[in-house]
Image (cartoon, rainbow, N blue to C red):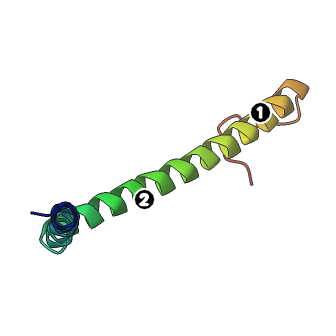
Amino acid sequence: MKTETVDTLAALGGKTTIAGAGMTGVGWLTSNELFGLVGACVAIGGFLVTWHYKREANKRQAAEHEVRMRRLRKGLDTDVGGLCD
């Protein structure tokens, strides 16, 4: 065989391998594993949202606690149980 023919066949083989791998990936994603992947992404997203808002609530509660403690130290707040109006 000529060198050009061998090179052409080698290039065609490489492209066929890439196409086969791509078709395998598409086939995997269109099967039931797609739902598992989407579910995992939703779970991770839910975890991140929960983590963010819990962190914000923690900051808010820490600031509220600090204000309450300052008021107690000054003798301004007599309601220790947290039942303020």
Inter-mark Cα distance, 2 to 1: 32 Å
| Residue that appears at 17% across and 75% down | 30
User: Which secondary structure, mark 2?
Assistant: helix
> Quarter-wise, where is residue 34 in the image?
bottom left
Residue 66, label in figure: 1
From what the image shows, is residue 20 above or below residue 55?
below
Amino acid on which disc 2 is placed: Gly
Mark toward the start of the polypeptide (2 vs 1): 2
Considering depth in this image, is 21 or 72 the residue closer to the camera? 21
The residue lying at 84 percent from left, 30 percent from top is 70
* Residue wearing tag 2: 45
Q: Residue furthest top?
A: 73
Query: Where residue 9 sits: x, y (%)?
Result: 15, 66
Q: Nearer the viewer, mark 2 or mark 1?
A: 2
Question: In the image, is 18 to the left or to the right of 49?
Answer: left
Looking at the rendered structure, the secondary structure element under dot 1 is: helix
With 61 as the anchor, is 75 left or right in this view?
A: right
Percent of width and height locating residue 55: 59, 44
Residue 78 visible in image: no
Please tell me whether residue 33 is drawn above or below residue 73 in the rendered image. below
The residue at the point 50 percent across, 57 percent down is 49
Give above or below for 49 relative to 28. above
Q: Quadrant of the rendered structure where residue 71 is?
A: top right
Q: As rendered, which of 35 and 78 lies closer to the eye?
A: 35
Name the residue located 25 percent from the left edge and 62 percent from the top edge: 37
Q: Compare residues 26 and 44 and report the one nearer the observer.
A: 26
